[in-house]
Each structure stands twice: as structure tokens, then as C-alpha cells.
Image (cartoon, grey):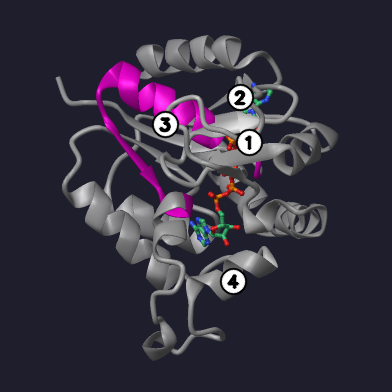
């Protein structure tokens, strides 16, 4: 049997990163995330691609999408070497969705449904380990010692794009560009919706059931 091909969709802060890591562990598949890949290559020179800015950093700090050519290449390289995968943060517009359909087939696209006030609260309270990337929330998922990672003892920092102003812009970009992607997969018949407002464990169980049912 081939490994699951799963797409996780949702607004910024819906829990895609949190749930993708768990799915990747549970099904022993690759976690492919354009957000982490871009954060690891923020200062890569993309000026030769005829882009408005010369680095991914400039787009990300403004809450804008990084150009398709950059992220399409990241995803193609990652999927070429993966059997099963959970894709997180891509596609973010219809052009990326079209490209994805040329390079792979999906078993299921899971949409995590979370209200906007909850999204803002989650993102502005998120803290991330600058050593190992583990995710926390100052209120919903605090570390044992404030500012210190439980996993590796690294420093917990706020992402540059988690300030309230940039979060609002990311949500606007999501509504304009990525919400149509959700409708696209609904029309294709591969979309399932999961209530993303339960506890992380509850949300995970709901996603796992959908993936089991689809594969
Ligand atoms: P990216 O890193 O993909 O950011 P995002 O989609 O905005 O998603 P987030 O990582 O912010 O949220 P998430 O849904 O993963 O939530 P998380 O699990 O962390 O992209 C960043 C930027 O890169 C973009 O703005 C863009 O510039 C660029 N980019 C990336 N992909 C691109 C693409 N394809 N095309 C163009 N540009 C691209 O959870 C959030 C918080 O909530 C955490 O604190 C967590 O602890 C908490 N939490 C999670 N689940 C729960 C729960 N059930 N209950 C309570 N709290 C919870």
C-alpha cells in the first residue's frame, strides 16, 4: 500500500504545524512545510527570479506571499524524495494548487476550521524555540519555565510575523488568496472539514480518522 498523501489547509494559526508534526510521526511520513523551509532560507538571494524583493525575508516580514517560483521549487524537491507526506502551508493560491496537481495526487485535503478571534489570540501568543523549532503558547501550551524550551533548553522567541499588525495582514492575504484554494478542493471532492477549536489531542484524533478513511 502506498503511504498517505495528505494536505492540511487552514488560516494562519489554525494549527497546521502542530497537527502536521503529529501526523508525520503517527503515519511515518514526511512533513513538508513551505513556512519552515522559507524561514530556514530567509536571506536566500532570489533577485535573479525577477521578484519585487531580493529575499524571502522581505515578503514574510510584510505578511505577503513569497513568489510562486520559489515555493514551487521547494515543494517539488521535497515531494520528489517522499513516499508519503503531509503538506503544510502550500498551496496558498490557485496557481500553486494547479502546479501541485501536475506533480502529485492527493488522498485527502483536510481543512482546519478556526474562528478569526481565536486565530489572532493563538498567533500573538505563540512562542517558538530558536534551537529546535518546538511550538508553545503563552497561555494554551506554556513551557514549564517561561522563555525556555522543555525539549532542548533553547530560548523561546516570538516569530517576526506574529505581531498583531502582521497577523492581520496575513489573515487578509489568506482570505484573498488561500480561501479560494479550499473551495477548489471542495469542488474536486477531496476536501474534509475538521473543527480546529478542540484541544490539540481532539483535533488530532479527528484528522487521523479522516486520513484513515481516505487511505
Ligand atoms: P507559515 O509558517 O506556513 O505560516 P502560516 O500558514 O501563517 O501558519 P502558521 O505557522 O502561522 O500557523 P499554523 O496553522 O501552523 O499554526 P500552529 O500549529 O503554529 O508561513 C509563513 C510565511 O511564509 C507566510 O506568511 C508567507 O510569507 C510565506 N509562505 C509560506 N508558504 C508559502 C507559500 N506556499 N506561498 C507563498 N508564501 C509562503 O499553531 C499556532 C499557535 O496556536 C501555537 O502557539 C500553538 O501552540 C497554538 N495551537 C495550535 N493548536 C491549538 C489548539 N487546538 N488549541 C489551542 N492552541 C493551539
Dividing the picture into quadrants, the one containing residue 70 is bottom left
Measured Cα–Cα span from mark 2 to mark 1: 7 Å
- Per the model, the C-alpha gap separating discs 1 and 4 is 27 Å
The answer for how far apart the CA atoms under marks 2 and 3 are is 11 Å
Question: Mark 1 or mark 4: which is in front?
Answer: 1
Mark 2 vs mark 3: which is more N-terminal?
2
Rendered residue at 43%/44% (across/down): 131
Labels 1 and 4: the sequence-earlier one: 4
Q: Residues within 10 Å of mark 3 (few under 14, many from 20)?
A: few
Q: Which residue is mark 4?
A: 59
Asked whether residue 191 is drawn in magenta, I would say no
Residue that carries the numbered disc 3 in the rendered image: 152
Asked whether the residues under the numbered discs 2 and 1 touch, taking CB atoms below 8 Å apart as contact, a structural biologist would say yes
Q: Which residue appears at 39% of the width and 72% of the height?
A: 69
Q: Residues within 10 Å of mark 2 (few under 14, many from 20)?
A: some
Q: Where does label 1 land, which residue?
A: 147
What residue sits right under mark 2 in the picture?
143
Q: Sequence order check: which comes first, mark 4 or mark 3?
A: 4
Q: Is residue 176 left or right of residue 151?
A: right
Q: Is residue 17 magenta?
A: yes
Whether ligand 1 has any atom under 8 Å from the Cβ at mark 4 is answered as yes
Amino acid at each position: 500500500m502506498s503511504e498517505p498523501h495528505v494536505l492540511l489547509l487552514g488560516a494562519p494559526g489554525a494549527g497546521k504545524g502542530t497537527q502536521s508534526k503529529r501526523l508525520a510521526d503517527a503515519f511515518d511520513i514526511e512533513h513538508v512545510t513551505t513556512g519552515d523551509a522559507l524561514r530556514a532560507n530567509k536571506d536566500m538571494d532570489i533577485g535573479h527570479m525577477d521578484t519585487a524583493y531580493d529575499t524571502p525575508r522581505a515578503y514574510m516580514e510584510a505578511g505577503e506571499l513569497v513568489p510562486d517560483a520559489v515555493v514551487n521549487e521547494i515543494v517539488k524537491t521535497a515531494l520528489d524524495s517522499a513516499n508519503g507526506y503531509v503538506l503544510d502551508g502550500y498551496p496558498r493560491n490557485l496557481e500553486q494548487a494547479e502546479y501541485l496537481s501536475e506533480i502529485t495526487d492527493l488522498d485527502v485535503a483536510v481543512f482546519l476550521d478556526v474562528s478569526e478571534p481565536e486565530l489572532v489570540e493563538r498567533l500573538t501568543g505563540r512562542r517558538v524555540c530558536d534551537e529546535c523549532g518546538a511550538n508553545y503558547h503563552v497561555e494554551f501550551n506554556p513551557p514549564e519555565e517561561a522563555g525556555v524550551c522543555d525539549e532542548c533548553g533553547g530560548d523561546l522567541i516570538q516569530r517576526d510575523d506574529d505581531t498583531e499588525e502582521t497577523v492581520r495582514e496575513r489573515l487578509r492575504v489568506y482570505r484573498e488568496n488561500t480561501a479560494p484554494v479550499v473551495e477548489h478542493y471542495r469542488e474536486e471532492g477531496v476536501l474534509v472539514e475538521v473543527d480546529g477549536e478542540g484541544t490539540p489531542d481532539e483535533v488530532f484524533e479527528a484528522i487521523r480518522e479522516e486520513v484513515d478513511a481516505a487511505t
